[in-house]
Image: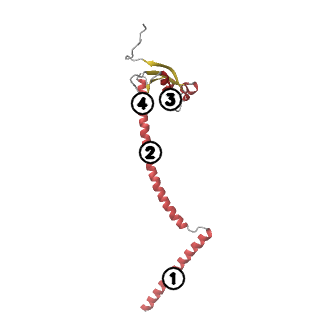
Amino acid sequence: MWQSYTNALITAFGLSGLGFGIGKLVIVLGERAIERRLGSEGVRDVIARRAKMESLFEARRASRVQELKELDGAVEDVLRRRKAMERQVEASRQSGERLVRLIGEEVHGCPCYVAMIVNKYVGTASMQQSQHALIDASWAQPQTVEVWARSMAEARTEIERRYPPAFGYAVTRMQEFLSADTPIAKAG
């Protein structure tokens, strides 16, 4: 009797395994038939590849976010330094000292020429309402420039090289600077 129950149990498990296998085969063949009919063959491979790509894109995004944070820090540092420099320039303007721009180096035997330069684009009436994009507003007033050169013509050439007339710079006055060391010729 135990033997018949055992045989029946084995037969039941065998038939259920066979039924499971046939059902699994029908499902796999059905999925493939549907994929072929709808033209979606290899969808599983595509999904797997896209999942890998998604993880790679997330990693790349995280690295880019980190780079952006570092660059934002650098930009903030540059802006902070710029503000400090602007405060220094404003403080020097307000202190009453005049800003003197230098061209060339002091060489023994070469005279120093003092020129007053203005930018006509900054000072024009059409530009009064809005600031010039590239030129500081201080150029509306004559700026002092000291030039070390052998002659006045060479000094003017150096000024025009540094401050081109094509950009609106114009020399309003130029003279040789006489220091206390310079001997003055007496008429006689």
Q: Label 3, secondary structure: give it.
A: helix
Q: Residue, x 54% and y 77% (percent of image)?
A: 25
Look at discs 1 and 2 and give the one toward the viewer: 2
Q: Mark 1 is on which residue type?
A: Leu
Count of numbered tags:
4
Among all residues in the image, which is located at the extreme top?
A: 188
Along the line of sight, the residue nearer the viewer: 183 or 113? 183
Q: Earlier in the sequence, mark 1 or mark 3?
A: 1
Q: Label 1, secondary structure: give it.
A: helix
- Distance between the Cα atoms at labels 1 and 4? 88 Å
Q: Label 2, secondary structure: give it.
A: helix
Q: Residues within 10 Å of mark 4 (few under 14, many from 20)?
A: few
Q: Which residue is identified by label 1? A: 18
Look at discs 3 and 2 and give the one toward the viewer: 3
The colour scheme applied to this rendered structure is secondary structure
- Distance between the Cα atoms at labels 3 and 4? 29 Å
Q: Earlier in the sequence, mark 1 or mark 4?
A: 1
Q: Which residue is identified by label 4? A: 87
Q: Which residue is identified by label 3? A: 161
Look at discs 3 and 4 and give the one toward the viewer: 3
Q: Residue, x 43% and y 49% (percent of image)?
A: 66
Q: Mark 2 is on which residue type?
A: Leu
